[in-house]
Image (cartoon, rainbow, N blue to C red):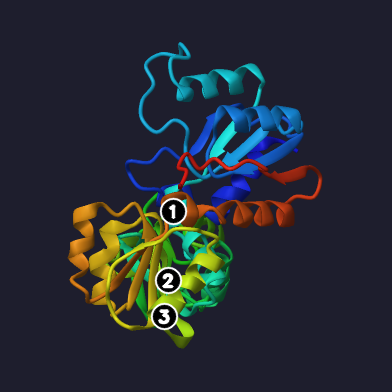
Amino acid sequence: MQLKEIISSLEELAPPSLQETYDNSGLLTGSPDQEVTGVLVSLDCTEAIVEEAIRTKSNVIVCHHPIIFSGLKRLTGKNYIERVIIQAIRANVAIYSIHTNLDNVRHGVNREIAGRLGLINTRVLEPITKRLRMLVTYCPESHSEQVRNSLFAAGAGHISNYDECSFSHSGKGTYRPLQGAAPFSGTINQRSSEDEIRLEIVFDDWKESAILKALLAAHPYEEVAYNVLELQNGHPLHGAGMIGDLPAEMDRMDFLAYVKKNLKTNTIRYTNGPSKIKKVALCGGSGSFLLGKAMAAGADTFITGDFKYHQFFDAEDKIMIADVGHFESEQFTINLLADYLREKFTNFAVRLTELSTNPINYF
């Protein structure tokens, strides 16, 4: 098993194009062609994590937070980042980070939190925009199903909880084959017409290459007419944060105790707000930027980490902010990744780190 096979699978789970522009997800050290002896999954990559990987004969570390976040100009070992990179390279341990792209998929970090809180009717809090495309193409009626099925197989036509979605209507196309052409039908230098289907299918922008390849392979025409349009719609499956409902309304303090238990945190910084909690918004990691979205969506509480002092005032007692901590909100991400890799690959060991990488202690 080569590392590139694991990378390909992880990028199906969370496409790299969904990471934020400031992020640095992906392969940070190692070669895609190296053979995999074992995978260690962690939230962060520290010197102790690399040592654990070496000790357990795991030559791949899959972590959530990228150890290289901004540019490195030299590797002299002056700080923990440089030391981790040097240590990993010397031991031939690959480091792969899957960060904000995993935050931005519906089945990622936030779904893991929502599941542990038992939320129902969940949806993305702030759907990403300008990531949906519409393919418009024209093909003869005789080949319309062939083209449609090929596009579906390549991943087009998937909208929320539905797939194989498309729209078509009939018309008549005209063309005149010129000298040197090899037309599907018609005569050189004579205008021809064909009963055609106009086919429209939505797809995710990161699938565009595969979609167009499938179109050209299935289409009978020598020259295929098509157009790709950028849609402004929010993506129903991908974006920041999540919102859902508790199965039953809870008193505020009972809810906080419930969160402490289920998210395994000993400390919650919180504001006043509604006395009863039913609708819950959340975001793993640093989610203060979504407070306005949570309020606009009618959430009774917003669970995240890393709120600053003055940001707590923005709740204005209309919503309860529950800051559970950055590490605490994301700690179950490693379970998500390990379970996914164990399901996909059975020919090497996938281990959860036995170490806590939380740099914060509470007294």
Residue beneath the point at 44% across and 71% down: 256
297 left or right of 53 in image: left
What whole-number distance in Å separates the C-alpha atoms at marks 3 and 2?
Answer: 9 Å
The disc labelled 2 sits on which kind of residue?
Ile
* Image disc number at residue 201: 2
Splitting the image into 4 quarters, where does residue 56 fall?
top right
Circle 3 is placed at which residue position?
Answer: 168
Of residues 58 and 193, the one nearer the viewer is 58
What is the total number of numbered labels drawn onto the structure image? 3
- Image coordinates of residue 206 in percent, x first then y, are 44, 53
- Whether label 1 touches label 2, CB < 8 Å: no
Farthest bottom residue in view: 248
Farthest right residue in view: 347
Nearer-N-terminus badge (3/2): 3
- The 10 Å Cα crowd at callout 2, few under 14, some 14 to 19, many 20 or more, is many
Nearer-N-terminus badge (1/2): 2
Q: Which marked residue is nearer to the observer: mark 1 or mark 2?
A: 1
Q: Which marked residue is nearer to the observer: mark 3 or mark 2?
A: 2
What whole-number distance in Å separates the C-alpha atoms at marks 3 and 1?
Answer: 23 Å
Nearer-N-terminus badge (3/1): 3
Residue beneath the point at 32% across and 43% down: 21
What whole-number distance in Å separates the C-alpha atoms at marks 1 and 2?
Answer: 15 Å
